[in-house]
Amino acid sequence: MDALQPKKIEGIFTPLLVPMDERGQINEPEFRRFINWLIKCGVHGLYPNGSSGEFTRHTPAERRRITHMVVEEAAGRVPVIAGAAEANVAETLAACEAYAEMGVRAVAIVAPFYYKLAPESVYAYFAEIARNSPVDLTLYNIPMFASPIDVPTIRRLADEFPRVIGIEDSTGDLAFMMRMMAAIRPSRPDFTFLTGWEAVLVPMLLIGCDGGTHCSSNVVPEVTRRMYDLTRSGDTTAAMRWQFRLLELFDAMLYPFEFPYGFKAAAELRGFHFGTGRLPQTAKQRGEYQALTEILECILGDIEVIGRPNGGPARLREPNEIPPAQLEQMIVKVVGELRHRGLV
Amino acid sequence: MDALQPKKIEGIFTPLLVPMDERGQINEPEFRRFINWLIKCGVHGLYPNGSSGEFTRHTPAERRRITHMVVEEAAGRVPVIAGAAEANVAETLAACEAYAEMGVRAVAIVAPFYYKLAPESVYAYFAEIARNSPVDLTLYNIPMFASPIDVPTIRRLADEFPRVIGIEDSTGDLAFMMRMMAAIRPSRPDFTFLTGWEAVLVPMLLIGCDGGTHCSSNVVPEVTRRMYDLTRSGDTTAAMRWQFRLLELFDAMLYPFEFPYGFKAAAELRGFHFGTGRLPQTAKQRGEYQALTEILECILGDIEVIGRPNGGPARLREPNEIPPAQLEQMIVKVVGELRHRGLV
Amino acid sequence: MDALQPKKIEGIFTPLLVPMDERGQINEPEFRRFINWLIKCGVHGLYPNGSSGEFTRHTPAERRRITHMVVEEAAGRVPVIAGAAEANVAETLAACEAYAEMGVRAVAIVAPFYYKLAPESVYAYFAEIARNSPVDLTLYNIPMFASPIDVPTIRRLADEFPRVIGIEDSTGDLAFMMRMMAAIRPSRPDFTFLTGWEAVLVPMLLIGCDGGTHCSSNVVPEVTRRMYDLTRSGDTTAAMRWQFRLLELFDAMLYPFEFPYGFKAAAELRGFHFGTGRLPQTAKQRGEYQALTEILECILGDIEVIGRPNGGPARLREPNEIPPAQLEQMIVKVVGELRHRGLV
Amino acid sequence: MDALQPKKIEGIFTPLLVPMDERGQINEPEFRRFINWLIKCGVHGLYPNGSSGEFTRHTPAERRRITHMVVEEAAGRVPVIAGAAEANVAETLAACEAYAEMGVRAVAIVAPFYYKLAPESVYAYFAEIARNSPVDLTLYNIPMFASPIDVPTIRRLADEFPRVIGIEDSTGDLAFMMRMMAAIRPSRPDFTFLTGWEAVLVPMLLIGCDGGTHCSSNVVPEVTRRMYDLTRSGDTTAAMRWQFRLLELFDAMLYPFEFPYGFKAAAELRGFHFGTGRLPQTAKQRGEYQALTEILECILGDIEVIGRPNGGPARLREPNEIPPAQLEQMIVKVVGELRHRGLV
């Protein structure tokens, strides 16, 4: 590799949660303390202004302030990929320039959202940014929230623009990931594939992914790092044991809460104050928050990243109780039952 | 019109529910009694072996027996459109021949199901049947259960095969219905458009539909007939008043039950025995059945097609209570709440 | 009605397209000329910062500037409902205050987008805004782009907050509209129901809607106004004749283009300069634009709102040619054929 | 393990394609020849009457005849799991009895299809069968075609009925597979998990699946067997190399054809006559068939399971040509382009 060539992006990049204070403003000291803890826990990089960072709920000025703090606090210890999508191409390019000047390794651009665009328009959008960006860029594919980026579009962008150096993919679809790798690696071996769906982190690494950007790495950074290291070292059995534990935690943080508030609740248990966030809650929702947090406490105690609650055994659930890992499926079932009840 | 030309299909065609006895067999005497009642209540035609008739849960021999009884009992008083789809084209054509011989006005062929076919294959399937059928045929489009039939395919079939004389469409999508009528009527003014989504029966008639095939006409045949007559006579206001009532009943029969068991429960209240059907139920489901039936009783009492339950006022619900018309939406809401409860 | 009570919102409210200049900035003089033309053509009100207005592609400052111009130009001749959704509740309330001061009749708030929220959170979001807004607000339900607002949530908001005075619904689902009206009108007869799906404008008015907010009214404001007047006067037949014409135009503007660029292309043919917009295009897309515009020209000539192209007959298409009204269905068909070609 | 306890089901079970003759009847001699070849190629078991076997396009009598031939030809060399779903529970149980008598290892019951059932009804259906079946049964979960079977339902059935011994899951969703294994293995270590989505066969085996039932094993049985053996022996790298090749073949067989006709076309290239099947084709489709088959020939030649076509190099595609692996994505893209063309 050329000595001047920047290193290929690899490993666990944390899409940073953002702590808020009582007035609904970004809690800067807590954010800086959190960033330092993550780096000490072994994450390979930081990713401000992702979906985990609730980038759409911040103002343009706040998004820049967040990136500024992250780069400053990282201080060259780990690379930073900054989410740079703004209202339109001109605003996005201005953000790219600002972040390039701050010293980020790359920017991440989510596909256009709200309007669902056709592939040709998705291509045109990224091509326009790639043509003018002063910094390397990665594509952020999250079809559950934004326009999908399909394999031919990714290939076209990878072939035409050396500035496009990777993709963060949140589909969790292994066959799709393999199709991307088969289409792009022959001509662009330097291209980075990161998965954003930690429910399948170990399988994704086993099929050839370079790493992941997972909200869970805000909560258990040492665990996702260990999963990465175990997989890389060939210990699939041990890596999968952790994968099953992470899946239980992930399901418990993701499905009963609005994203990313379950992850914030769990990260609170690691000793950080995330505040109430910018999504209004009803009194009822606030009441339920406590019960849900207790479940998270048990799982984290079970994984042994926090002390066991109440000095007792970590696992409060009885062996016969239904584990949180089946939350989503249960909800589907409950709906069916409600349909049969009729009074609802 | 040519005197030999059969009359265009128009009006309310009831997709017949099938009464079962205690041994799970078709209750023939009750079925015949039911058919006679429907004709007396004013439906314009009968439609055995539709989705309402649970055609997939019967054997090929039972489907023929059902059609035979319907034609025999109708005895020329009203036309019969018989569902004739079987496992493959050869079996389907054999059924078409049998039904032609029985004297049905037309057959109805649902688009291929289980496998979801592309439009070219849907065309090939219907073309092969139309080419060989000894009887007029109608296309049955129900994309929620079977391969969709798109506008160009319908147009192609209508243009090439005079034997294809109409469509039953269960999408409830008015714009789609208008697109079909705009594409086909210029060249085939005789082509019949029937809606299978009674939630919007009156609007469908207002935009130009020729009638409908609705499961609700098993339950309140006089009401759907009245809605048809009022709309045809130009009394939109009165027709819409009934449409709102029918929508409440429809929602209460459709969403809390597996289809078509809510319609069967309501038809029982009109004095017919439909038995338990061929779908196994849990003890819990059987318990809920009673509560749901009470709701149906109130709505039917309110419409005044049955006596008011318990000699009291028809409507048991308090004015402030949430009406069954919002069942589906409430379920969506309950799911959201369950997600926040977490213990489920 | 109380003399001090503001008039119920009714009629056609145009969700304004925004003309851009060569530098990609808002073309203010053209925007003002366009607004005046719309008012002269008979629209009942104006609606800046809707989906047609590409609100997500503008900066917060631009959205305020747009509303300011609209209110100024309307000058009390027609009421204004201004889209006021910003990045979070605090920013949204600041916009509500600014727009209240400008003199809008109401604001419109789209449900939260990007993240898909559960009904309880959608309620919490609107409740927080309704509790603090200095101006009447309407709910904007567009589930294809944003979190859905379900019937119980709408009812809950209508019951608790007199400030919530109506809904713009873009589903085009008539049964859903009837369920909303059945749930809310008994307790809130003043509540306004506007449809945003002009493909079914006349049927929606026939079932009881108060009006519509349609992108098409930027292109043929006199036609949508005529459809409204004909329906209100009871001439369903004439209204439906226009509905079929509008559907053909709508399909030709909506499906082959990214929204709302087909509408902008058609509005150009009415004599206004809309520029290229903020969505980058490939060279190929620019080439196709011309062919598509010719189709729009024919349809508009056929409706006789513009002169017939080339001095010849308005309609270039041959009678046997497939009309643009089936564009969507044809695409579905083409996909099926492509699957069978294999080389694509 | 009890000596009398039958062996746990493991390995590659081929869901058998069924050869047809010129008259559209089952080609019995060819079917028997095909079965013997598969066994010699190393598949661990046979699975008649699955989706690959087009069970819905056969009559009940044909389904029995098929199973009879398979059991007879297998002659105890490999176990047989027979698809036994019929029109209703009574007919299904009669098939179970017939297949038990023939000597199948187990039956496979697909979840109810056409009507989409709620989980409680799916449970009731399988419970009724499990209660009365004289033979072990496996659940067949294929939500793209039939009612979904969720994790709590599978767990409930596994806990209550020892007769329910496994699941064939065609979702290809690794997280779902892990949730099932986490929920069921603690209490039922004997329960078998087979994946039906060979696009991710190796990753599924790596996370703990017991094997697979894949249509591709009709075409390249030695390859899927090799993938199984390599994964079991710990050679993930070699197994994944084959996985990427299989994915290319799978995409080329699945997406451009109606299922399972691409698999039949490829199996023809292995030397068996599958006939035209029971799905009518247009002349156009027949023409495209040849071009598609040439692509399959190249891929199979490349894998070296057949001779290279025309004596030349196996791979006809130029290096820069788009590989069939991206077929699905390309179709999505083409739709977008067609939308921009407008003339379609």
Image (cartoon, coloured by chain):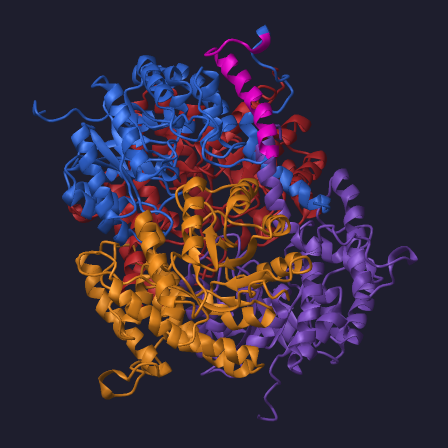
Chain colours: A red, B orange, C purple, D blue
Taking the magenta stretch, the answer to whether it contains residue D287 is yes
Q: Position of residue D305 (x, y in %)?
A: 45, 12
Decide: is C274 above or below D111: below
Tell me which residue sits at (65%, 53%) in the image.
Answer: C326
Taking the magenta stretch, the answer to whether it contains residue D87 is no
Magenta residues, as a range? D283-310
Work out whether residue B253 or residue A271 is closer to the camera in this orientation and state it: B253
Q: Position of residue B193 (x, y in %)?
A: 55, 62
Work out whether residue D30 or residue C68 is closer to the camera in this orientation and state it: D30
| Quadrant for the N terminus of chain D in the image | top left
How many circles with numbers are drawn on the protein? 0
Q: Position of residue A34 (x, y in %)?
A: 42, 43
Q: With D112 as the anchor, is D254 left or right in this view?
A: right
Identify the residue at the far front of this view: B4
Main SS, magenta region, reads helix
Q: Quadrant of residue B217?
A: bottom left
